[in-house]
Amino acid sequence: MEPIDNFAVILPIIQASLGVVFALLFRSGIRSAGHWGVAYLLSAAAIAVYILPVDGTVLTLVSDGLFLASYFMFGEAIIARFGVPPHRPLRLALGVGVFLADIYVVVGLESLGASVLVVDLGISLQLATACALSWRHMLRGIDLVIGLLALLSVFSNAGMALLFGVLLPPGEDVAQFLASNYAFVMQLLASAFSLWFGLAGLAAITLDMLGKYRQAAHHDPLTGLLNRRGFEVAARRVRGAEGKGVLLILDLDGFKSINDQFGHDTGDLVLAGQASLLRAMLPPQAVIARFGGEEFVALLPGVSLAEGGALADSVRLACAGRDWRQLGVDRAVTLCAGVSAYGPDDVSLRHALRCADTALYAAKAAGRNRVMLGRDGAVEPVGGGAA
């Protein structure tokens, strides 16, 4: 009975443990873990049923059905991860067709070898279909690992099925099957792939969560722009590739009065609208952030001070000329901007930030709705802004 004990206890414990872990992650709000949890719990049940004192034919069909369902869910997990069309009717039809064929060979032909061949090829096709639907989206390292493990499982299951499904004697019963070399090798490979596949799935979920937390930590939730921390990280990366450029600090004029007169919800819409304006008007390589309140900062790599001033003035004119009434503001919304340059010899952006800030305050003091250039402690106006 030792082979049966190994087959019926060791592997389902591994799979049930992984299923419980994924189920707990699902209950904590990580929806992508749901498919993995169901797949592992079904797979564990498919093996555990062999400990039941039930007729061998019934055990074989129940176990095969659970295996087919579990691999359908593994396919769902892979497909859901990459957001591709699941083609469920096709995959369900495949699973049902394989199970009907399995019933025929188990009940009609009484051939366990043919059953092994049919079911293992069926589950291989389920995984292969999921991989075929998703492979174009497997771009990250962990996604490639999941795809590679899935394909290895496909080739392993198909190869073992073709080898032992043909070699198993037609009249072999379940007890003889569980004591066979095929059952031992299947248990060994299934244990390894279950563990590796589960760890890869957990790693993928962990990396996804870390990415979401990093996104939240580096972005302003109202506008979708970078926040101060995200700006510092992105600015270091951009400055490493392009040593010189300009820095813009833009501040909406009289924003407190907008909040007081039209309400904070409307003020939030104005901030989001200004963020959209900056995205649309600044170059694609610009690093744009909301530093807090109504203040926005943009780093424009490879742009001269004169070009940066002209871009800032274009944004000023667009903001002042925009019809904000659709957002509930029935008056003009204007801004001031300070612009400064940085070079490859600047260790950090501190000096450029101070110069741009000084220029911004000069624009405010000059009557608002203006753009000022700041350099070497002096400021000069850009364009024809007016109060």
Image: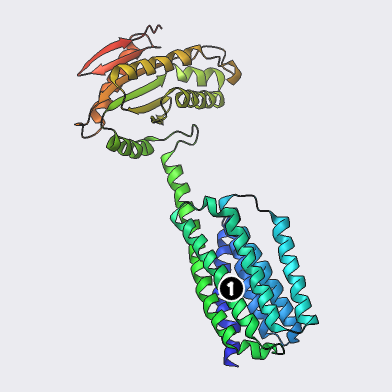
Asked if residue 74 can be seen in this view, the reply is no
Q: Amino acid at mark 1?
A: Asn
In the depicted structure, whether residue 195 falls above or below residue 304? below
In the depicted structure, whether residue 97 falls above or below residue 330? below
Q: Quadrant of residue 22?
A: bottom right
Q: Is residue 33 left or right of residue 255?
A: right
Q: Which residue is mark 1?
A: 157
Residue under the image location 53 percent in, 71 percent down: 194
In the depicted structure, whether residue 353 falls above or below residue 196? above
Q: Residues within 10 Å of mark 1 (few under 14, many from 20)?
A: many
Residue 137 x, y percent position in the rendering: 53, 50
Residue under the image location 51 percent in, 65 percent down: 149
Q: Quadrant of residue 327?
A: top right
In the depicted structure, whether residue 172 falls above or below residue 145? below
Q: Is residue 208 left or right of residue 376?
A: right
Quarter of the image where the C terminus is located: top left
Residue 79 x, y percent position in the rendering: 60, 55
Is residue 94 or residue 65 the one in the foreground? 94
Secondary structure beneath dot 1 equals: helix
Residue under the image location 56 percent in, 78 percent down: 11
Quarter of the image where the N terminus is located: bottom right
Residue 243 x, y percent position in the rendering: 25, 32
**What count of labels does the image hold?**
1
Is residue 242 or residue 53 the one in the foreground? 242
Residue under the image location 77 percent in, 71 percent down: 100
